[in-house]
Image: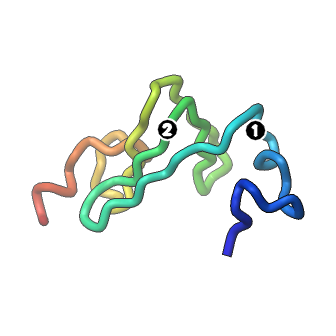
Amino acid sequence: MPNSPSDPSGPSSPSGSSGAARRVTVRRKGPVLVEGPVEVELEDGTVVSSDRFRVALCTCRRSRRYPWCDTSHRDRA
């Protein structure tokens, strides 16, 4: 289980980050919501980025804008 923010044995910030931890929200039948800005490394090594305050990452791979969610998961819910 991850260290709590008050745990002195844990790192003060995630590796490579410049401040507070990012909030990630997982939805059962929807995208993963990540507070931005973010960089996402794809399987082929390509890095895509977004400077939005929150991004939705596709988990069903139906999105035509993958890795960004375009709500295609709603078509087959």
Q: What percent of the width, then of the height, locates residue 49?
A: 56, 31
> Which residue in the structure is indicated by mark 2?
35
Residue at 48%, 44% (x, y): give it: 34
Kindly give the residue lying farthest to the top in the view shown. 51
Check the image and report above or below for 69 versus 26.
above
50 vs 4, left or right, is: left
Q: What percent of the width, then of the height, locates residue 71?
A: 22, 46
Indicate which disc, 2 or 1, sits on the residue closer to the N terminus.
1
Q: Residues within 10 Å of mark 1 (few under 14, many from 20)?
A: few
Q: What percent of the width, then of the height, locates residue 56?
A: 38, 43
| Cα distance between the residues tagged 2 and 1 | 13 Å
Depth check: 34 or 73 in front? 34
The three-letter code of the residue at mark 1 reads Ser
> Which residue in the structure is indicated by mark 1?
17
Residue at 53%, 46% (x, y): give it: 23
Disc 2, SS: strand
Quarter of the picture holding the N terminus: bottom right
Residue at 35%, 58% (x, y): give it: 61
Kindly give the residue lying farthest to the bottom in the view shown. 1
Q: What percent of the width, then of the height, locates residue 31?
A: 34, 53
Disc 1, SS: loop
Depth check: 77 or 45 in front? 77
Colour basis: rainbow
Depth check: 17 or 42 in front? 17
38 vs 55, left or right, is: right
Depth check: 59 or 13 in front? 13
